[in-house]
């Protein structure tokens, strides 16, 4: 993509309304623009990031055996009346009435809809287990939306729902999601810590929230320092095997948010206790037959008796993850994207646009990289070098390649890693090989 044609409305100054790092940088980098309180438009750069994160989430859900569906955003109120939640949910639910005076709502979550789908489609235990997921926009009418997309009213979410014949099966489904979540956040370059949590409006008996560590996070976090050395991606995972030992291993270490941490009762000595901040990006729930009993979602068991299915639900804030990555990975100059979530892999900077030699070298390198499948943002504008460098630092692409007259005299370009800041002069062939092979 050529920068001269790319819609990227960056800002030089920090917007006054932005209180946290991710909000400031997402506005300054031209990723989002506010439409109304807590509701944002995602511009091309932000939309690319959203799609990258979504794809990682999708891959991990598919690997765990989940199946993707898409359910309606607008739901009939009668389903929520069946579950008993319509009048209990509160003002966070956006309630509407259609032209036929039927009460509807903009879904804040989809337990009722997916239970209705299941009860009208599955009759026998032989068709279990099932785990259905979607990635879709949700709406919760927050009283005080703030912090940009971190606590907005409209948000992009992955939510999935498991159905099992008994408690043991439901625990297996829960454990699969527990492990899949650890892998998802690790692939995105985040250190996540699962913590036992309250079930809130979802209900149920057992739940964990996943907190990713970030110096500017919303909550204080206390955990055993051993957490910092764990690597979920080093685990060999067989989703058909018993995952309980893995879950036990990952939950044996101490971890608590500030509202649950009791210094007097903490089992970890002070020199082994990590104190930092974190951001909730995922939540998983086991709630048994809460919805299946209320809504009549039953199957016949091996003895021919009708029994309500055991259920769980599992959420990841996809749009929130974009903000969480920025909170965890930035510096004074701007964002530092992990390659897997970056809108482009490479920022190619023509230091003297209009110079025949620079233009020719940049065009050749740009074509070579694009043909090899490398995503490149090529800054071909007639702008000062300082402006171009500052923008590349701000938007945080993993690699920068600067081409100018001085380097061309000796046949080199400067390759710089955004994360560490290391820069080296390399031949164009070496630059290509590094970026295409890496």
Image (spheres, rainbow, N blue to C red):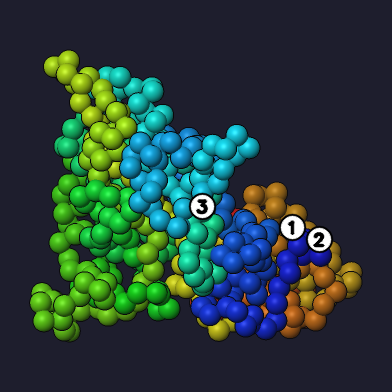
Query: How many angstroms separate mark 1 from mark 2 (CA)?
Result: 8 Å
Quadrant of the rendered image containing residue 423: bottom right
Query: How many angstroms separate mark 3 from mark 2 (CA)?
Result: 39 Å
Q: Is there a contact, CB below 8 Å, between mark 1 and mark 3? A: no
Residue 334 location (% of width, % of height): 58, 77
- State the residue in front, 19 or 354: 19
Check disc 2 and report the residue beneath it.
Answer: 5
Q: Is there a contact, CB below 8 Å, between mark 1 and mark 2? A: yes
- State the residue in front, 426 or 383: 383
Q: Which numbered dot is residue 1?
A: 1
Against 181, residue 399 (above or below) is below
Q: Which numbered dot is residue 94?
A: 3
Write the residue at 51% across / 72% down: 147
Against 138, residue 21 (above or below) is below
Q: Residues within 10 Å of mark 1 (few under 14, many from 20)?
A: some
The mark that comes first in sequence, 1 or 3, is 1
Image depth: mark 1 or mark 2 in front? 2
Q: Which numbered dot is residue 229?
A: none
Horizontally, residue 244 falls left or right of residue 149, namely left
Task: Determine whether the residue tagged by mark 3 lies in a helix, strand or loop.
Answer: strand
The mark that comes first in sequence, 3 or 2, is 2
Q: Residues within 10 Å of mark 2 (few under 14, many from 20)?
A: few
Write the residue at 23% across / 29% down: 308
Residue 422 location (% of width, % of height): 55, 78
Task: Determine whether the residue tagged by mark 1 lies in a helix, strand or loop.
Answer: loop
Q: Is residue 18 shown to the viewer in this render?
A: yes
Write the residue at 66% across / 50% down: 372
């Amino acid at each position: 993509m050529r920068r001269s044609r790319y819609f990227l409305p960056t800002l030089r100054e920090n917007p006054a309304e932005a209180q946290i790092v991710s909000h400031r940088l997402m506005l300054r980098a031209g990723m989002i623009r506010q439409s109304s309180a807590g509701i944002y438009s995602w511009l091309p750069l932000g939309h690319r990031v959203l799609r990258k994160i979504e794809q990682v989430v999708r891959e991990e859900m598919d690997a765990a055996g989940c199946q993707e569906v898409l359910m309606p955003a607008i739901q009939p109120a009668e389903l929520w009346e069946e579950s008993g939640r319509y009048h209990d949910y509160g003002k966070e639910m956006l309630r509407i009435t259609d032209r036929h005076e039927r009460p509807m709502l903009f879904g804040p979550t989809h337990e009722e809809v997916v239970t209705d789908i299941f009860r009208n489609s599955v009759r026998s235990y032989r068709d279990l287990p099932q785990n259905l997921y979607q990635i879709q926009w949700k709406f919760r009418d927050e009283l005080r939306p703030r912090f940009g997309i971190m606590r907005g009213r409209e948000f992009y979410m992955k939510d999935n729902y498991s159905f099992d014949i008994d408690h043991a099966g439901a625990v297996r489904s829960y454990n699969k999601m527990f492990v899949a979540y650890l892998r998802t956040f690790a692939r995105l370059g985040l250190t996540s810590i699962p913590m036992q949590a309250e079930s809130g409006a979802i209900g149920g008996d057992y739940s964990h929230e996943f907190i990713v560590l970030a110096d500017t996070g919303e909550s204080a976090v206390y955990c055993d320092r051993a957490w910092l050395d764990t690597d979920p991606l080093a685990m060999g995972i067989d989703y058909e095997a018993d995952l309980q030992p893995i879950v036990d291993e990952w939950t044996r270490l101490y971890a608590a948010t500030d509202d649950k941490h009791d210094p007097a009762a903490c089992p970890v000595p002070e020199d082994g206790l990590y104190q930092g901040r974190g951001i909730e990006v995922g939540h998983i729930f086991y709630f048994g037959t809460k919805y299946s009993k209320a809504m009549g979602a039953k199957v016949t068991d091996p003895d021919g008796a009708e029994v309500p299915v055991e259920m769980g639900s599992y959420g990841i804030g996809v749009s929130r993850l974009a903000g969480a990555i920025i909170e965890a990975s930035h510096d004074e100059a701007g964002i530092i994207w992990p390659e897997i979530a970056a809108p482009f892999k490479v920022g190619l900077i023509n230091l003297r646009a209009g110079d025949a030699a620079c233009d020719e070298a940049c065009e050749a390198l740009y074509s070579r990289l694009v043909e090899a499948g490398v995503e490149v943002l090529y800054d071909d504008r007639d702008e000062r070098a300082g402006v171009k460098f500052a923008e590349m630092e701000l938007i945080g692409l993993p690699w920068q390649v600067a081409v100018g007259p001085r380097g061309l005299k000796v046949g080199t370009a400067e390759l710089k890693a955004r994360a560490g800041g290391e820069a080296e002069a390399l031949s164009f062939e070496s630059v290509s090989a590094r970026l295409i092979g890496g």
